[in-house]
Image (cartoon, rainbow, N blue to C red):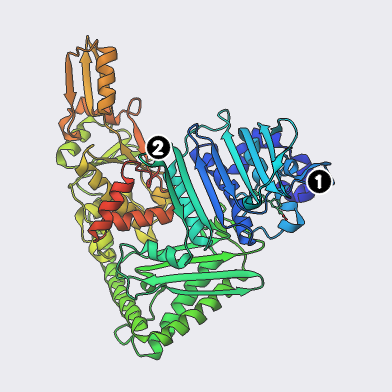
């Protein structure tokens, strides 16, 4: 039973002070790692977005200051500063010091955004070493400050507001180092979310400034503003994909106070990319809005295909997955009382939404097909091709399964398996090239470490359908070794190793192979990444010897530091490892495989839209966008977050 049902929501507010937030921060913001830290920013920005949705704000500026504090400024109505009856304190102070107080104001009742945890700015205050707020409202400029949630003095009216200044709120906070493990904000992470918010709320201008990085012409700054809203979101996602029709299909509807917006565009690609949002939250686990969309899409396309006699080549109807091949879509609903369910509370539960989205899509798309028969026909023909490939893949899969059932062992011959059968303990190194694979086989601890060598460049799965992918030996070996199937059939419960470790060289080729493997995992075994089971080795670049000691360095800078500080500038030997294959088994064990000393990088996919974009840009055909993308993002490498 949750506390809420025991006490009722009313009493909870009395029971919970900001002390509760400081004691159990994860309950309020999910975690205290880097994700939680960034969540503080989103919590404040969500309040500004609410002002925008209420029609009172169109400009938001987020600034990362030099000291890694963040401020969020908006031109909304400003947080109320008059005296709050119940508390006999300025409303501004109440909103910042009382949990859940923000949403309690009558004139702010339609809170669409509200954040995933929907906890309010008081939580940000509780978790900040210091927070300063400035409000322009009621003809004055008001300031208030807090230390770890406690007011530092009283709210002050500092001056009259100048006529041209208008109204607004600026909140600057310094996250509490005692609470957060991470202390640095990532420009890319914030930019991804703010871009997404700007797409989802057309007309709002959101600027992100980074004052830690000062370039030739001042601070690094990016502004997101999209008049076209989610239509432009789809265009952005499709930047490097070849679209099958020139303009994005868009429709919107409102029913029972629930707003529905859908934007979609079919492409020639094989990967579909559908993103569903509820109240600006990326509902990764899907829910009623996504179900409604898929049902209507399948029905509308099949109806059109039947009415126009386009399915003569097939025995059956088109399946949903055939139709969604290469489809890019964004679904956004705004609901006055959203229910979030699922493991990560990112599944929309409200059942009434399903029917509303379903009829909006059925009607909107039906009309579009009637008005654009050429596009409709192309979409159907592409789905027919996908259906044929799906049936061919099924046959290939069955064949693989029957073949392996006949052979005495179904595991690939190249795999050196480990002794333990307990996935919790077992790890597999997928090693690039036979020489690294050979060394790893000698170096490993066979009790719990398995090694699968793969040939350098595996198939680029971004460019082939499943039937072709399954013909590839390296891919088949990975599927059988991991042991949990593939695609829709993939069941993460069956994985044979809980650490799947990509062992590739620390050079450009290694990075390429890692990307190929990751693309494969992302497209066909995504739960592996979602569960955090995928890792990459981080072998050192240099080994330095001096007076009987050995030191490993991961970078050139680290090497120089060791040479200067540990070896009196005069090392006995500096060995550069060009690749894993060059290390002898003992070195490989010591630097890369021994759990005691090795450094593993865990690969997780933070943001599905960003990852999708990354894989289609990196692995697709278009060359220019790829170059630009790598130039923009490679140094941070945060599209795949650690
Ligand atoms: C409570 C009530 C109203 C607005 C806000 C809070 C508010 C909070 C934040 C946080 C950041 N920016 C914000 N802007 C507004 C409604 C005020 C009214 O009715 O005038």
The x and y percentages for residue 96 are: 70, 41
Image location of residue 341, percent across then percent down:
59, 56
Q: Residue at x 52, y 45 (%)?
A: 62
* Left-right relation of 224 to 457: right
Numbered marks: total: 2
Check disc 2 and report its element: helix, strand or loop. strand
Percent x, y of residue 252:
54, 74
Dot 2 corresponds to which residue? Answer: 214
Q: Are marks 2 and 1 in contact (CB under 8 Å)?
A: no
The quadrant in which residue 360 appears is bottom right
Q: Which residue sits at x=61%, y=73%?
A: 254
Task: Say above or below: 305 vs 276.
Answer: below
* Spot occupied by residue 280 in the image (x, y as percentages of width and height): 55, 58
**Of the two numbered discs 2 and 1 in the rendering, the one whose residue sits closer to the viewer:** 2
Left or right of 192, for residue 56: right
Label 1 within 8 A of ligand 1 by Cβ: no
- Per the image, the residue denoted by label 1 is 84
Quadrant in the rendering for residue 416 = top left
Give above or below for 304 relative to 53. Answer: below
Instruction: Give me the residue at 31% from left, 58% from top.
Output: 616
């Amino acid at each position: 039973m949750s506390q809420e049902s025991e006490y009722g929501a009313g009493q909870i507010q009395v029971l919970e002070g900001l002390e509760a937030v400081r004691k159990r921060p994860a309950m309020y913001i999910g975690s205290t790692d880097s994700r939680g830290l960034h969540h503080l920013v989103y919590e404040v920005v969500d309040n500004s977005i609410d002002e925008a949705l209420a029609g009172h704000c169109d400009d938001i500026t987020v600034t990362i200051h030099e000291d890694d504090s963040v401020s969020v400024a908006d031109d909304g109505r400003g947080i109320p500063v008059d005296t709050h009856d119940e508390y006999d304190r300025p409303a501004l102070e109440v909103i910042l010091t009382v949990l859940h107080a923000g949403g309690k104001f009558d004139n702010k009742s339609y809170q669409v955004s509200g954040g995933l945890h929907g906890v309010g700015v008081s939580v940000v205050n509780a978790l900040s070493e210091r927070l300063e707020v400035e409000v322009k409202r009621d003809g004055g400029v008001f300031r208030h400050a807090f230390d770890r949630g406690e007011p530092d003095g009283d709210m002050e009216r500092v001056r009259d507001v100048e006529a041209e200044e208008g109204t607004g709120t600026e909140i600057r906070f310094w996250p509490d180092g005692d609470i957060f493990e991470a202390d640095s904000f990532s420009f890319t992470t914030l930019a991804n979310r703010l871009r997404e918010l700007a797409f989802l709320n057309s007309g709002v201008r959101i600027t992100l400034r980074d004052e830690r990085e000062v370039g030739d012409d001042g601070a690094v700054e990016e502004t997101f503003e999209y008049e076209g809203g989610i239509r432009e979101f789809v265009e952005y996602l499709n930047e490097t994909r070849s679209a099958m029709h020139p303009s994005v299909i868009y429709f919107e509807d409102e029913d029972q106070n629930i707003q529905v917006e859908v934007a979609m565009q079919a492409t020639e690609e094989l990967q579909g990319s559908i993103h569903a949002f509820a109240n600006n939250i990326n509902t990764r686990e899907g829910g009623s809005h996504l179900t409604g969309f898929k049902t209507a899409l399948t029905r509308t396309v099949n109806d059109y295909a039947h009415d126009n006699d386009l399915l003569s080549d097939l025995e059956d109807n088109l399946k949903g997955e055939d139709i969604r091949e290469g489809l890019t879509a964004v679904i956004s609903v705004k609901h006055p009382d959203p229910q979030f369910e699922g493991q990560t509370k990112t599944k929309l539960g409200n059942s009434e939404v399903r029917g509303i989205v379903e009829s909006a899509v059925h009607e909107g798309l039906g009309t579009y097909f009637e008005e654009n028969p050429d596009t409709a026909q192309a979409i159907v023909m592409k789905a027919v091709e996908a259906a044929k490939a799906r049936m061919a893949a099924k046959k290939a899969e069955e064949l693989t399964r029957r073949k392996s059932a006949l052979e005495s062992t179904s595991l690939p011959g190249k795999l050196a398996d480990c002794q333990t059968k307990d996935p919790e303990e077992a790890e597999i190194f997928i090693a690039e090239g036979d020489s690294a694979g050979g060394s790893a086989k000698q170096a490993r601890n066979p009790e719990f470490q398995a090694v699968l060598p793969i040939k350098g460049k595996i198939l680029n799965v971004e460019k082939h359908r499943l039937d072709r992918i399954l013909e590839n030996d390296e891919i088949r070996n990975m599927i059988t070794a991991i042991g949990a199937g593939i695609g829709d059939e993939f069941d993460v419960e069956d994985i044979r190793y809980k650490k799947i470790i990509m062992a590739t060289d620390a050079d450009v080729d290694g990075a390429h192979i890692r990307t190929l493997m990751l693309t494969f995992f992302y497209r066909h075994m995504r739960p592996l990444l979602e569960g955090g089971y995928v890792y990459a080795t981080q072998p050192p670049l240099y080994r330095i010897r001096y007076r009987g000691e050995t030191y490993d360095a991961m970078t050139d800078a680290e090497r120089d530091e060791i040479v200067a500080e540990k070896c009196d500038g005069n090392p006995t030997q500096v060995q550069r490892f060009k690749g894993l294959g060059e290390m002898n088994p003992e070195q490989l064990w010591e630097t890369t495989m021994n759990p005691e000393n090795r450094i593993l990088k865990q690969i997780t996919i933070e943001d599905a839209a960003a990852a999708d974009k990354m894989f289609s840009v990196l692995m697709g055909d278009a060359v220019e966008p790829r170059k630009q993308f790598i130039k923009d993002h490679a140094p941070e490498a945060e599209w795949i977050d650690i």
